[in-house]
Image (cartoon, grey):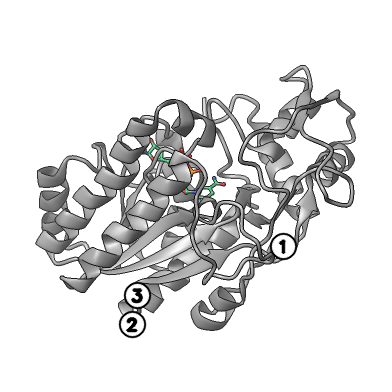
Amino acid sequence: MRVLVTGAAGYIGSHALKRLRAEGHDVVALDDLRRGHVRALRGVELIETSVHDRPRVEREMKARGIEAVMHFAASCYVGESVERPLEYYENNVVGTLRLAEACVAAGVGTFVLSSTAATYGEPDVVPIPEETPRRPVNPYGRSKAMAEDVLTDCAAASSLRPIFLRYFNAAGADPEGELGEDHDPETHLVPNAIRAALGRAPGMRIFGDDYDTPDGTCVRDYVHVTDLAQAHVRALEFAAAGGSCRAFNLGCGSGYSVKEVVDTVREVSGRDFEVSIEGRRAGDPPVLVAASARARDELGWRPEHESLREIVETAWRWLEAHPNGYE
Ligand SMILES: NC(=O)c1ccc[n+]([C@@H]2O[C@H](COP(=O)([O-])OP(=O)(O)OC[C@H]3O[C@@H](n4cnc5c(N)ncnc54)[C@H](O)[C@@H]3O)[C@@H](O)[C@H]2O)c1
C-alpha cells in the first residue's frame, strides 16, 4: 500500500517507516520537525508540514495516491500537557481532526492512530483489557481519548476506518542499530538510565519507592519499538480488510518495576550510577500492564523482543554509539 506516515521523523514513526519498507509498502513521511530528526527518515521523502495544514495534506494525498495513513504526529509529554493543555488539545485533537478531514476529502479510508495507555488513567483492573472505561487523568491522555472519539464519530459518517493502538511503555531501539530514541527533553526511563550509565547525566531519579508493589517502585509494561512497528503494519492490514473503530492494547503483558529496569541497565552496561529517590508524581498509577490477547488474536501480532534485557540491550547499543542522538 501507499502509506502516509505522520510524525515519521520521531521515535516510533521512524521505526514504523523502516518496517513498512521492509514489508514492501510505499511510504511518504510527513513531519513538521518540531521534535523529529531528518536523519531518522533514512532517505524517505519528507513532506515538511504540519498535519494542521489541511489543504496541503489533502493535495499531497491526492497527488500521491495515498491509500492509508499512520498518524504518529502528536505532542506526547504528560508533564508538559499539564502546564500547556491547550497546546495539547490543539495538536492532538484538532490536528487529528484536520488530518481526518483531509483523509475523507482525498478518499483515504485506512487510518491507524497512535493512542496510549494514558487513556485508561488509573484503572481498577490489571492487566488492563481494552473494554476498561477510559478515565484519563491528564490532558495528554484526555487529548488522545478525544482523538479516538473524533475518529469514531467521523467513521460513522464517512468511509474512514480508524484503528486505535494503545501503546504501553515504548522502549528499545532498532536491533540493526540504524534508529533509536532521541527526545529533548528525555522523559523516558530506559534512555534516562542509560544516559546516567554513559555519564551524560549526573544520575537519575526514581519517583516514589513506597507504592504497593513488590519493591515499592512503579511497575510498567515495556514494549519494544520494533514490535510496535510490526503491530502497525498488522493494523493496516486489519483496517484495509474492513476493520474499523477497534482499539488494541500494545504491551507484552508483563510488568517490570523501575528498580528492575535500573538494575538491567546496570547489568547490560556494566556501569554503576547514582539513583536518588524522590516523592511520587501525581497521576502515576502503581501498576500499568496490558492485557494484549486482542492484538495477538485479531491482528496476528507476534512480538519478537519481549525480554526486558533485549529491550535495554538494543537501547544501550544505539545510545552508546550515538551519545548525541541523531546530531
Ligand atoms: N513513546 C511512548 O512511549 C508512547 C506511548 C504511547 C503513545 N505514544 C504516541 O506515539 C506517537 C509517537 O510518539 P514518539 O515517542 O515517537 O514521539 P516523538 O516526539 O518522537 O515523535 C512525534 C513526531 O511528530 C512530529 N509532530 C508533532 N506534531 C506535529 C504536527 N502537528 N505536524 C507534523 N508533525 C508533528 C514531531 O516533529 C515528531 O517527529 C505519539 O502520538 C505518542 O502520543 C508514545
* Residue at the disc numbered 1: 306
The answer to whether one can see residue 274 in this image is: yes
Q: Residues within 10 Å of mark 3 (few under 14, many from 20)?
A: many
Give me the C-alpha separation between circle 3 and circle 2: 5 Å
272 left or right of 224 in image: right
* Residue at the disc numbered 2: 241
Ligand 1 quadrant? top left
Residue 30 horizontal/vertical position (percent): 29, 45
- Where on the picture, by quarter, is residue 192? top right
> What secondary structure is marked by label 3?
helix
- What's the residue type where badge 3 is placed? Ala
The answer to whether one can see residue 67 in this image is: no
278 vs 194, nearest the viewer: 278
> What secondary structure is marked by label 2?
loop
- What's the residue type where badge 2 is placed? Ala
20 vs 215, nearest the viewer: 215
18 vs 69, nearest the viewer: 69
